[in-house]
Image (cartoon, rainbow, N blue to C red):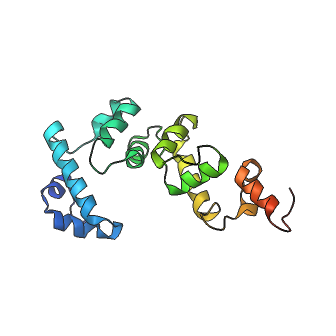
Amino acid sequence: MRRFPTLARLAAAPAPEVEEAIRVGGLAGAKAKAILSALRRLEEERGAYTLDFLAGMPLVQARGYLTSFHGVGVKTANVVLLFSFRRDAFPVDTHILRVAKRLGLVPRNATLARAALLLEPRVPAGEHASLHLNMIRLGREICRPRNPRHPECPLLPVCPEGTRSMKAAPGAPRR
């Protein structure tokens, strides 16, 4: 934002300058192209660099519009809808996907996008942001990819994988 304080300045910037400004986030080349392409499209279609019109669209339609942009998947669309528009969208990242699979909330072969669409309607209205953030934290700190900390997990009593693991561990405490 310091380098390009307005969307108009960002849209007018050469791709290498945008790449340099966002390099710290990784995949700068692809992201710069996607950002500049999205801004061009918004200007052509809407005459302005805004997504405010999404606020009045049904959630499914708004998500469909966002995912029609190159480089925007269901997760990114849901992040925009949840945090920018306070819509009941549910972004699923790798941490949430791991937790949901271990809890048996989604099939073991579910993708990020499929898991988001399966979980989203099951979340009570208005709870999508807090559940999203709490599941990420749980996945990072306790339900880790390797060496999950099952004994510390507050969801152990309802977690099939954690329960199996605790029973199989030699000397595991009984609950």
| Residue 3 visible to the viewer | no
**Between 116 and 168, the one nearer to me in the picture:** 168
Residue 60 sits in quarter? top left
Residue in the picture at 49% in, 38% down: 117
Q: Is residue 21 left or right of residue 118?
A: left
Q: Is residue 127 left or right of residue 152?
A: left
- Position of residue 131 measured from the top left corner of the image (x, y, whole percent): 57, 47
- Position of residue 132 measured from the top left corner of the image (x, y, whole percent): 53, 49
Q: Is residue 85 left or right of residue 122?
A: left
**Count of numbered circles on the image:** 0
Residue in the picture at 46% in, 40% down: 89
Vertical position of residue 102 compared to residue 118: above or below: below
Residue 156 sits in quarter? bottom right
- Position of residue 18 measured from the top left corner of the image (x, y, whole percent): 21, 64
Which quarter of the image is occupied by the C terminus? bottom right
Vertical position of residue 74 compared to residue 173: above or below: above
Residue in the picture at 24% in, 54% down: 35
Vertical position of residue 78 compared to residue 9: above or below: above
- Position of residue 128 measured from the top left corner of the image (x, y, whole percent): 53, 42
Residue in the picture at 53% in, 38% down: 118
Which quarter of the image is occupied by the N terminus? bottom left
**Between 133 and 104, the one nearer to me in the picture:** 104
| Residue 83 visible to the viewer | yes
